[in-house]
Image: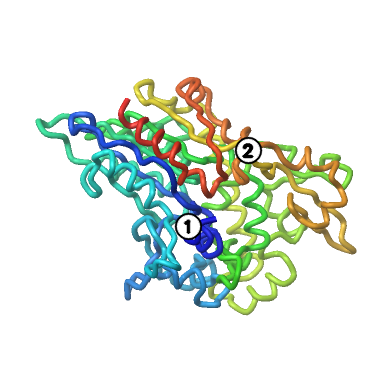
Amino acid sequence: MPRACLVQALALTLVLTGGCASGRIPVRHEPSAISGRVVVFVPGITGSELHDRESGRVQWGNFRSLFLPRDGGYGLAVPIGGAEDRLEAGAPLLRVGTIPALRGDVYLPIVRAYEEAGYERGKNLLLFGYDWRRDSIENARLLARRIDAIPLAAGGTVQKVHLVCQSNATYLCRWAVRFGDVSIDEAERGMRKPAIRARVASVTLLATANGGGIRILREIDRGRRYVKLGGRKFRPEAFFTFESLYQDLPAGRADLFVDAQGAPLDIDLFDANSWKRYGWSIFGRDAARRAARAPEIFGDEATRLAVLQRFLDRAKRMQAVLKSDAAPWPEDTRLVSLQGRSHPTMNRAVVLRNGGGWRTLFLGDRELARHPELDGILSEPGDIHASISSQMTLSSSELRALGDSTHYFEGDHLTIAHQAETLEMLVETTQE
C-alpha cells in the first residue's frame, strides 16, 4: 500500500470519506458543455467544519480536532440541559492536515474532478456546508434557500442545478427537491415551495442509506473514535444529542432485532422507553453516570427521555414523508444512484439477556463469532453502512425517476467517493 494511503487509513478513518484517489481524472469539458450549469455538492454527517461562534476557532474539521481535546466529544454535543451551543457550521471538509505525511483528502478528490472538468469553485461549483448535528429537515430548508439564491445565468435564464449528495445528505437533497423550504407539518399536507430562480436538473445519490441503517444505533449506543489509534473518543452521550443521527435510523421496519437463535423480537426502536429499557446510549450505566456530572449539557433523565422521544417522533415522520408521494419527484429532474454492494452490511441487531439487564450485539462483535448461523440474518450486501435494501428505499415516484440509473462500484461507504470510476460518473451525470 502506498505510504500516503497507509497514513490516511491510519489517521483518517472518517465516517464521511477516506482512502486514496487513484486512476484517471475526468477529462476537461468544453465551456459550452457546462454553460448554464451549477453543481452543488452536499456532504454527509461530520462532513462540514464546526467553528466556535465567537472565536472562529475550528472545533471539528482539522487534524487537531481528530485527537483533541480529550473531552469525550462533549465540546461538540448539542446541549439539552440549558447550556449555550457555541458552534456554527463552516465549509465542507476537503482535506485534513497540512503536513504531507499526515494529510488526508476528504472531499477534495470530488472537487478536483469537477474542477478538472471545467467547473470553478465558488461560481458554478458550490459546496454546501451545514451543521450536521442538527435536524436534517431544517438543513434541507437551508439547502432549498441556497439553491433558490443561485444567480440567473447570462441573459436572465434559469440555471440548471445538479445536486451531488453524499451519505446522510440524501435526506437534505430529496427534501429540498420534492418539498423545498417547507416544514414537516406542511410537507405532510403535500405542500411544496420549489425554487424559482434555479431548476434542479439532476440529483446524484452517492453512498446513501435512503432508508437509514441500524449501524447508526451502534454509533449512538457505543460512541466511536474517528481515528482508531489514539484518536479522540466520542462518548455515547455526546452522540445522543445529535438529532440528525436519529433521522438516519431505519424507520418503518418491525424486523430490526432478533434473539440469539435469530427469532424476531418485538422492540420499537422509535419508542424512547425502549432505549431506557435496553440501556442504549445515555441510558447505559456508565454513560448515565458520566452525563449526571454534566447536567448543563445533558439535563436530567426526564429531560433526556422527552428530548429523545421528540427526536424519534420527528425522525419517523420525516422518513414516512420521504417514502410517501405527498410531493412526487419532479418529472424533469433526473435521479442517479452511485452505490456499493460488495461488503456485508449490518441489517439487524441481537438483543440478549445479561443478568438483570440486556445486551445489544451488532455484526462484527466477538460474541457473535460463536453464532455464524446469524450472519445471514444480521447482514446483507451493501457498502458497510448502507445496505442494498436501504439504498433502494425510495418513494414510488423516486423509483420511477431512478429507473435503471443505479450504478455499483468497488469500495465501501468511506472509499467509494474516491474511486476514479465513481468520479468520472459523477461528472458525467452533470453533462447529460
What residue is shown at x 41% (from left), y 63% (from top)?
Answer: 96
Q: Say above or below: 229 vs 250.
A: below
What residue is shown at x 32% (from left), y 29% (from top)?
Answer: 201
Residue lying at the far bottom in this picture: please name it: 293
Inspect the image, locate mark 2, and give the three-letter code of the amino acid beneath it: Ser
Label 1 SS: loop
Q: Which residue is at the front of the view, 387 or 106?
A: 106
- Which-is-in-front pick, marks 2 and 1? 2
Q: Say above or below: 413 vs 189.
A: below
Asked which quadrant contains residue 199, the reply is top left
- Quadrant that contains the C terminus: top left
Question: Image check: 248 left or right of 204?
Answer: right
For disc 2, the marked residue is 342
| Lower position in the chain sequence, tag 2 or tag 1 | 1
Please provide percent x and percent y for residue 254.
Answer: 73, 37
Label 2 SS: loop
Q: Residues within 10 Å of mark 1 (few under 14, many from 20)?
A: many
For disc 1, the marked residue is 46
